Amino acid sequence: MNSANNHPLLEVKDLGVTFTDDKGSLQALNQISFSVDREQFICVVGPSGSGKSTLIRVLAGLLAPTSGEVVLDGIPINEPRQGVGIVFQKANLMPWRSVLRNITLPLEINHVPQNEANERASELIELVGLTGFEDWLPHDLSGGMLQRVAIARSLIQDPDLLLLDEPFGALDALTREKMGAELLRIWRVRKKTVIMITHDISEAVFLADRVLAISPQPGNLRLDLEINLERPRQEDDRFSPEFVVYTQQLRDAIR
Amino acid sequence: MKTKYMLWILVVIFTAVSCSIQPANDGPTGELTHIRLPMGYIPNVQYAPFYAAVEKGFFEEYGIELEFDYSYETDGVALVGANELQFSLVSGEQVPIARAQGLPIVYVMAWYEKYPVALVSKTEQNVKTPQDLAGKRVALPGPFGANYVGLRALLGEVGLQESDIIMESVGFNQVEVLATDTTEVIVGYSANEPIQLKAQGYDLDLILVSDYLDLVSNGIITNEKTLAEDPELVERFVSAALKGIQFAVENPEEAFQFCFKYIEGLEDADQDVQFEVLQASMELYQTDPYGYSHPEAWENMQGVLLQMGLMKKEIDLEEAYTNEFSQ
Amino acid sequence: MKDFGVGIRKIGFLVLSILAGLFLWQMFTTFSQIPSFIFPKPIEVWDRLIIVLQDGSLMKHALITLQEVLFGLMLGLSAAIITGYFLAKSRIVERVLSPYIVASQSIPIVAIAPLLVIWLGPGIFSKILTSALIVFFPVLVNTVVGLKSVPRELYDLMRSLQANTWQRIIKLEIPAAMPVFLGGLRIGATLSVIGAVVGEFVGADKGLGFLVNVGRGLYDTALVFVAVFTIVLLSLGLYGSVIFIENRLLSWQKRNGD
């Protein structure tokens, strides 16, 4: 796809974010540096208040860093740009739009003709397993289905980088595990670079090639852990000794 | 302890109650008939004869305790018609209109002899006679009430139609619309709008409806029931009111002084202008004899109202008024 | 089919309640022997209605009022939407304007209606403006509340999709603020009729408010009733239209719970 396959897709250099208001300032992220190769699946874990969401907002270009920089494909990120798909904490769908129209929203904004948009959407609808629900309204869907719509929407512009901000946080444990497996399947088909925020350590280990552990206030990068579990991963992997060791290491890092 | 307090409270309540009841039963006001009189307009120096009649004790002399009521004229007529009230001060045209609708009211005392409506314009408009109105823009509160009746009567008298003028409904804002030249002619009360405008330095021409046509004017109404069952009350009321009118005619300045108690803000108003309003209204009074209304003025009024369509059928004017109480 | 049955029953109850009201009214006026210039009987009002329908005067006056109301609504709505948008978007505008807006809300419309007649003349404009003024506030408030209720996350979404301002307004803010906005419109539509009638009350020679004045001036209480019922009907008609628009535009809200 891209000629520059020899350097990392994303580089985060000495990233720092400080929020300042009348009451004082809060350092959310401090001196974060890491890089992500193409088609890697990265999970970022950390307790609440560790600035995970701040990190995702900076990567998405929704928030400008106070210090340091984020370089995507050789270009610093200062504002939202093409080639990045985002899945928010809440599914964040427009309740007045049907499943299909929610998924095609990004194309609409970029003036893609409706025929082509519908075609591309129906492929994704099939991929996320929502065939038959095209005309349903978000009100009538379950939490898991809503996030499937959100994932389909984030993929419709065929982004290089997919950012997920605790996408399954609001789901029950069973749906969560199922959605995790779904996500892996989609990732395998679409071969995207994924950065996903989660507070669930075992979810992170199960999904990721690498897990970054961030500590709270200020958010420092404590551990950059490579997960060497064989793919495709199986549900049983969660009970393997390596899995337990990885989760233990991460737990210690962010304590 | 508690019962002792209760006892004291009871004593206090008892005393308070008996104190408040006693004067109502035995006091001097107990013998007076309480009358609430709708005046048809806001407190105004034009009502000086009535304020004087109360202050000089004329009403009390005739056994009446008078309370003024400043609600709408039509409400006053309806309340008397329904015998909720016994008397009201109304404009002349209201009587045939109301009787035609089946309200059993009777006009028992003329206060004004002359119909009070005038057409007012700045002198540069050159509106000296009713004929000059043709093609002019004429503003009035709306096509209802004494202003409208006066205008139509005047037009009819000189053979003009409503369509010969440009009629504008402006609410009770005649002074403002004439002052700002929003219109050319206004219809108003000769004792009100022109005096206010003159006080602001405008030169005006007035056409008085009463110079062209006798129309029954402002006075007191009662209802058929009161007239039949308690003519003595009507007699007392009219006598007291006429005494007030006579007093005001003879002592205008003293009558004016009584207004201060009844009209809020009169102290701060231009006293000369206000006194002029009173004097101008006095020129309209029926004084010879007091309280008398001319049969011809009734005939004329009925004719105008029928022509205007404000009455659908003719009424028996004999039942609409009586001069039995005039003096 | 089920909806149809419910509709029939609703209409049935409505007819029943109107009939019961008319019956009580007739009973009350018959037995209390209240004179008809105080409280007319239903049949007298009906007769009066037939007369003004046949001579076309009711239609004429109603159309004038309707015209004032529609223009008033349009004017009030546009002013409220534009002001509301800037109010919701800008802290500075909010701070500068809100004292005036709060004060304007407490102006009794009856008190300034005569002034409007002086300023704008006796024609239709003063009525349009009284109507617009009375519409303005509830619509403004709901526009602001509606816009402020648009979820922050959806703004983030639109930003991340690089939507421009126009796309943000059309695709996000308008549909998201619509339910609250329409709630304001519902109130505004009903009030707009009152505004126009108040304007006519002050100084007019046509319109339903004028017809009320005529009825009062002639002790023709049946005519007053006819005019008042027509005013109510007009209000209900406008209210119904807003409900109709709501049902069309907000069908996405109604589907849950099925």
Image (spheres, grey):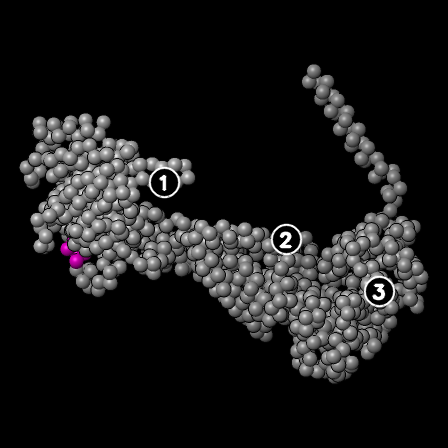
Q: Nearer the viewer, mark 3 or mark 2?
A: 3
Decide whether residue C14 is among the magenta residues. no
Local SS, label 3: helix
Separation of disc 2 and disc 1 at Cα?
72 Å
Local SS, label 1: strand
Magenta region: A120-124
Pick whichever, C120 or A228, lies toward us: A228
- Reply above or below: B79 against B316: above
Residue named by callout 1: A20
Other-residue count near label 1 (Cα within 10 Å), few / some / many at <14 / 14–19 / ≥20 = few
Residue drawn at the location 15% of the way across and 55% of the way down: A123
Local SS, label 2: helix
Residue B111: x and y in percent read 85, 64
Quadrant of residue A11 within the rendered picture: top left
Q: Chain of mark 2?
A: C
Residue A224: x and y in percent read 15, 35
Other-residue count near label 2 (Cα within 10 Å), few / some / many at <14 / 14–19 / ≥20 = some
Quadrant where the C terminus of chain B sits is bottom right
Q: Is residue A182 left or right of residue C147?
A: left
Residue B170: x and y in percent read 66, 68
Residue named by callout 3: B276
Which three-letter amino acid code belongs to the residue tagged 2?
Answer: Phe
Residue C172: x and y in percent read 33, 55
Q: How many marks?
A: 3
Residue drawn at the location 19% of the way across and 29% of the way down: A253
Mark linked to residue A53: none
Residue named by callout 2: C28
Separation of disc 1 and disc 3 at Cα?
73 Å
Which three-letter amino acid code belongs to the residue tagged 1?
Answer: Thr
Q: Chain of mark 1?
A: A
Which three-letter amino acid code belongs to the residue tagged 3?
Answer: Glu
